[in-house]
Amino acid sequence: MSKVGAVELRVGNLLEWDKRVWRVLKCYHVHVGGRGGAFMQVEMKDIEAGTKTNQRFRTEDKVERAFVDPREMTYSYQDGDFYVFMDKENFEELRLSAEFLEGQSGYLLPSSDVQVNLYNGRPIGIELAPSVILTVTDTEPAIKNATATNTFKAATTETGLVVQVPPFISQGEKIKVSTDDGSYMERA
């Protein structure tokens, strides 16, 4: 087991907390100016019971990472409600349900590499790269000379993920999206 700082937590990480193994679903760094220190607000799911909880960790806290067997796999294709991954070492296929992926399926492109974590020989979660490049398939037409604005519009990507993008983004463009919170980062 290894301890990591609370600020190093990312979506998909596995923690051992309160004598159970939890998967991080969402995490936010929160700093309330003038009212104490910063903290990490973490939404976690118990991998055994399926219950969810919100936990607040101070930024200086150390959190125990669960010992898992990480496997490098390649996402192959979607088969109905299942997503098929291929192990890079032994070429075995692993089928994971859309419910198991809990919203991470919007970041999966065929032939993309992911880390599938196994706990006692059973898949318990996947870890994605910090960002992914997706192509915009549908959005409102781009507004000319709209570069300095704080308004956003909805854009649907090739995986079906809907991302809020600046008004100058048009259909067919590639954008970089954060896999932590699904936010637009930049043009790719």
Image (cartoon, grey):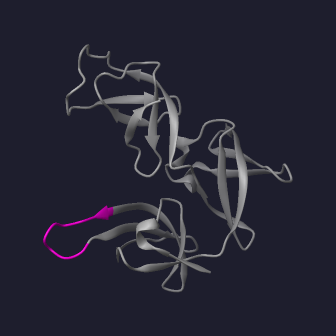
Question: Which residue ends up furthest to the right in the rendered image?
Answer: 90
Which residue is pictured at 66% across the width and 38% down the height?
A: 78
Residue 34 forms part of the magenta stretch = yes
| Residue 70 in the image: above or below residue 81 | below
Nearer to us in this view, 91 or 132: 132
Residue 85, percent from left and from top: 72, 47
**Magenta extent:** 29-37
Residue at 27% x, 64% y is 30
User: Which is nearer the eye, 40 or 141?
Assistant: 40
* Residue at image location 39% in from the left, 39% down from the top: 185
| Number of marks present in the image shown | 0
Rendered image quadrant of residue 120: bottom right
Question: Looking at the image, which residue sits at the far left?
Answer: 34
Question: In x, y percent, where is residue 122?
Answer: 71, 67
Measuring from the top left, give residue 166's x and y in whole percent. Answer: 29, 29
Q: Position of residue 113 (x, y in %)?
A: 67, 45
Q: Is residue 99 magenta?
A: no
- The quadrant of the rendering that contains the N terminus is bottom right
Is residue 64 shown above or below 92?
Answer: below
Predominant secondary structure in magenta?
Answer: loop
* Left or right: 90 in relation to 65: right
